[in-house]
């Protein structure tokens, strides 16, 4: 059974997915020749998702270097007609990615997640490589990271690389890209805004339950791949009507 607590995105749970956290091969570019050239070997092992500057990464290197490389090998059962989405929750600060020798994309921003559809490049046996650079430039947000080689006052250890979860998930040819849900308590309604990956007409079904009891279900057609509608979630049962979420009663 799928463990919802361990799934990286509990708002968009899919049953077929692969956790890519754990041991990765790792290379530190200690001079400019390693900044752009792909390394032939990766002398370190690193635990993702931790910056190598932190103890939990298990990398025995104290000095900070602004360019690092990662490599991850993984097997995958590739099903015809399916899509495979590669998720990175956060990589600090700029990164470029290759899969099986193909350049597949890049991302800038150390605190924002991103996703790449790797369907046309993935095979049964895969090699994923990630190049990351973080020069702590003055024109990029660094939060509370120190710009020196050591911690001082309220400034903490420099961070570089993959510092949040990485995973791969399988979808069908058409799938939900995003779903936004807004409760309107005074109207006893739930507003749902759902977007598909492609602009097609499809039927979307929404089922709302509370503690295993179905409250309501609704079908809605998408227009250009989007469905935007509101659902009445009130109930005539005097023991139900509406339950309100609070820290003391986290009713979902």
Image (cartoon, rainbow, N blue to C red):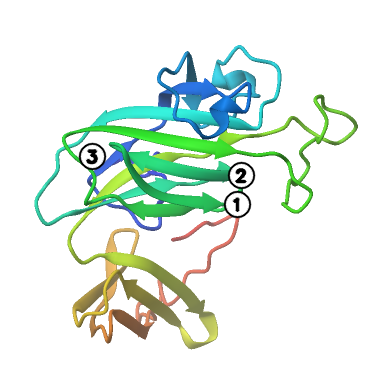
Q: Quadrant of the C terminus?
A: bottom left
Say whether residue 90 is left or right of residue 216: right
Which of the marked residues, 1 or 3, is nearer the chain's N terminus? 3
* Marks 1 and 2 in Cβ contact (< 8 Å): yes
Q: Which mark is residue 1?
A: 3
Return the residue found at the far right: 153
Q: Which mark is residue 185?
A: none
Q: Which is nearer the eye, 85 or 183?
A: 85
Q: Which is nearer the eye, 70 or 84?
A: 70
Dot 1 corresponds to which residue?
109
Count neighbours of disc 3 (C-alpha within 10 A) and say few if under 14, some if 14 to 19, many if 20 or more: few
Count neighbours of disc 2 (C-alpha within 10 A) and say few if under 14, some if 14 to 19, many if 20 or more: many
Q: Which mark is residue 93?
A: 2
**Residue 50 showing in the rendered view:** no
User: Is label 1 in a helix, a strand or a loop?
Assistant: loop
Say whether residue 8 is left or right of residue 185: left
Q: Quadrant of the N terminus?
A: top left
**Residue 175 showing in the rendered view:** yes
């Amino acid at each position: 059974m799928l463990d919802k607590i361990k799934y990286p995105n509990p708002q968009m749970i899919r049953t077929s997915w692969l956790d890519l956290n754990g041991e990765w091969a790792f290379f530190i570019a200690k001079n400019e020749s390693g900044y752009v050239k792909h390394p032939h070997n990766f002398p370190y092992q690193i635990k993702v998702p931790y910056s190598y500057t932190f103890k939990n990464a298990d990398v025995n290197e104290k000095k900070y270097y602004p360019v690092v490389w990662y490599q991850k090998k993984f097997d995958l059962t590739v099903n015809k007609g399916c899509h495979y989405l590669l998720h990175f929750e956060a990589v600090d600060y700029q990164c470029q990615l290759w899969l099986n020798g193909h350049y597949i994309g890049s991302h800038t921003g150390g605190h924002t997640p991103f996703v790449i559809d790797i369907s046309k490049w993935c095979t049964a046996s895969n090699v994923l490589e990630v190049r990351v650079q973080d020069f702590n430039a003055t024109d990029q947000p660094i939060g509370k990271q120190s710009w020196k080689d050591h911690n001082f006052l309220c400034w903490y250890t420099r961070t570089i690389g993959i510092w949040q979860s990485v995973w791969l998930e399988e979808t069908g040819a058409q799938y939900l890209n995003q779903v936004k849900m807004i409760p309107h308590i005074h109207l006893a309604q739930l507003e749902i805004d759902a977007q598909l990956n492609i602009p097609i007409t499809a039927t979307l079904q929404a089922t709302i339950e509370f503690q295993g009891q179905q409250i309501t279900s609704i079908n809605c057609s998408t227009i250009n791949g989007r469905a935007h509608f509101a659902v009445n979630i009130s109930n005539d049962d005097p023991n139900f009507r509406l339950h309100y979420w609070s820290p003391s009663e986290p009713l979902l």
